[in-house]
């Protein structure tokens, strides 16, 4: 198990190496450890309500999980209330780990959050389901589920 300082240092290293416009990036395992070690840390799932209902969601500590859609279902229309909803769910100075299906929307959410004053916005690499395998299936190559971290199905 890593220390909290090591986890944040690794996220910062990725920020510098990849010139990220937010606080940094964490792997699924690092995110899970970070959430266990830092009671102020929050996991914000930016997938659609439909994804939660049909696919499942991560299981983390009490009060550490929030759902704020980046886009709406159906249609993938941007959630115009994203920042307002985020601000009501999470304190701006708390570490916020953004999660989506495969780490595309989470990066966008981290960028917008950082622009809005969330100084500790992080992207959760690999996402919940991860990349597709050769047959087009997820949860078999990378991601929160593939890494064996706790989650509940739909």
Image (cartoon, grey):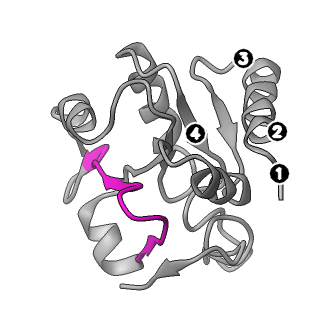
Q: Residue at coordinates 33% horizontally, 79% vertically from top-left?
A: 54
**Percent from the top left, x then y, of residue 56?**
41, 77
Tell which circle, 1 or 4, labels the residue nearer the N-terminal end: 1
Q: Secondary structure at mark 3?
A: loop
Q: Are circles 1 and 2 on residues that touch, CB within 8 Å?
A: yes
- Would you identify the image quadrant in which residue 139 lies? bottom right
Relative vertical location of residue 116 with respect to residue 46 in this rendering, above or below: above
Callout 1 secondary element: loop
Q: Could you classify mark 3 by the number of other residues whose Cα lies within 10 Å: few (under 14), some (14-19), or many (20 or more)?
A: few
Distance of mark 3 from mark 2, alpha carbons? 19 Å
**Distance from the alpha carbon under mark 4 to that under mark 2:** 17 Å
Residues under labels 1 and 4: Cα distance? 19 Å
Report the quarter where the N terminus lies.
bottom right
The residue labelled by disc 2 is 6
Q: Which residues are magenta?
A: 56-71
Residue 68: within the magenta? Answer: yes
* Residue that carries the numbered disc 1 in the rendered image: 2
Pick the front one: 154 or 86: 86
Residue beneath disc 4: 123
Check if mark 4's residue and mark 3's residue have beta carbons within 8 Å.
no
Residue, far bottom: 153
Residue tagged 3: 19
Left or right: 40 in relation to 81: right
User: Quick one: quadrant of the C terminus?
Assistant: bottom left
Residue density around tag 4, few if under 14, some if 14–19, many if 20 or more, within 10 Å: many
């Amino acid at each position: 198990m890593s220390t909290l300082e090591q986890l944040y240092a690794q996220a910062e290293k990725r920020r510098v190496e990849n010139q990220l416009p937010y606080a940094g990036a964490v792997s699924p395992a690092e995110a899970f450890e970070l959430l266990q070690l830092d009671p102020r840390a929050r996991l914000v799932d930016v997938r659609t309500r439909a994804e939660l209902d049909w696919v499942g969601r991560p299981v983390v500590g009490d009060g550490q999980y929030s759902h704020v859609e980046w886009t709406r279902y159906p249609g993938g229309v941007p959630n115009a209330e994203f920042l307002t909803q985020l601000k009501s769910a999470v304190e701006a100075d708390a570490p916020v780990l953004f999660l989506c299906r495969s780490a595309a929307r989470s990066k966008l959410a981290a960028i917008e959050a950082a622009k809005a004053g969330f100084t500790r916005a992080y992207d959760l690499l690999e996402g919940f389901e991860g990349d597709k395998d050769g047959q087009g299936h997820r949860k078999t190559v990378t991601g929160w589920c593939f890494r064996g971290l706790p989650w509940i199905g739909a």
